[in-house]
Image (cartoon, grey):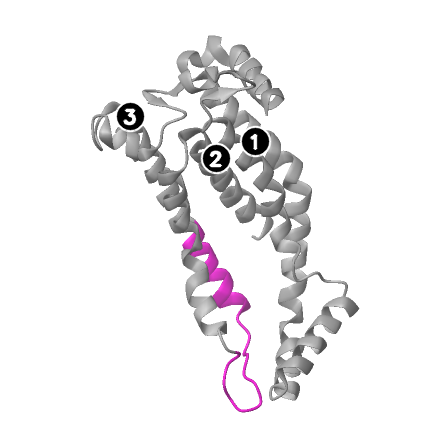
Amino acid sequence: MSVFANLVERLAQLLEPFFHASAAAAAIVLFTAFVRLLVHPLSRAAARGQKARTELQPKIAELRKKHGKNPERLQRAVLDLHAEEKVSPLAGCMPGLFQLPAFFLLYHLFSNPTIGGEANALLSHELLAAPLGHRWADALADGGVFGAAGLVYVGLFALVAAVAVFNYRRTKRMMAANEAPVPVADGEQVPGMGAMRKVMPFMSFFTLITVAVVPLAAALYVVTSTTWSAVERAALYR
């Protein structure tokens, strides 16, 4: 972790003439953009996989009609169909999974008071008036919602909420456009499918909770990555 800390510190030093006290925050944004660029090929593959899975929906609906009373046989048939068409049902998860190490690195880096037995100098950096190692609870305790640090979080929450609303509307449109009938033989839907369809559009709003509870540095990574994802998905899934 000390190597990663040195990398962030060096990048912050390079950006200091432009961003001054918020140079480390700018370094985190650039680091996030670099990670997203590395993951972009996986995002493109996930978009192609989503298109292929959408094209399989009529065939899957037929399998549900045929094997609806035998869930195990239905599952095997669906997996065989994906294998036959060379479509991975898990492809959409890969971009998110590959970002987790970067998120946890930032989380631990800005949660530890010491690194390699020495004081963690990164904790002295700020985003405007909010220390990168603090959380929203610290901002509330130091000036309240509209204090100097609290206003930084108000801005982040507003950005996350705007992105979440954008994702909500886009997800609803995509689900409406790609929705296929999913009855089984007895006329009922696959258990849990209806609930999943209702919950999926709201998933982006859970980012607000993450931003509120993690250190500001990790929250900044989440906000930058979420905004990137919204723009990227709008382009790839148009």
The residue at the point 42 percent across, 66 percent down is: 198
The residue carrying mark 1 is 33
Element type at mark 2: helix
| 144 left or right, relative to 24 | left
**Is 62 on the left or on the right of 190, as rendered?**
right
Q: Is residue 104 magenta?
A: no
Mark 2 and mark 1 in contact? Answer it, CB < 8 Å.
yes
| Residue 134: x %, y % from top left | 36, 28
List x then y, in percent, for residue 124: 40, 16
Q: Which residue is mark 3?
A: 149
Q: Which mark is residue 224?
A: 2
Q: Dot 3, crowdedness within 10 Å: few (<14), some or many (≥20)?
A: many
Q: Which residues fall within the magenta stretch?
A: 167-190
Percent position of residue 216, x then y: 40, 30
Kind of residue sitting beneath label 1: Ala
Q: Is 120 drawn above or below residue 221 in the view shown?
A: above
Find the residue positioned furthest to the right. 84
Mark 2 / mark 1, whichever is N-terminal: 1
Which quarter of the figure has residue 156?
top left
Q: Quadrant of residue 21?
A: top left
Q: Is residue 181 magenta?
A: yes
Query: Label 2 is placed on what type of residue?
Result: Thr
Q: Earlier in the sequence, mark 3 or mark 2?
A: 3
Q: Secondary structure at mark 3?
A: helix
**Residue type highlighted by circle 3:** Ala
Q: Residue at x 59, y 25 (%)?
A: 1
On screen, 89 above or below 61? above
Q: CA distance from mark 3 to mark 1?
A: 24 Å
The residue at the point 65 percent across, 58 percent down is 90
Is the residue 181 above or below the residue 157 in the image? below
First in sequence: mark 3 vs mark 1: 1
- The span from disc 3 to disc 2 (Cα, nearest Å) is 19 Å
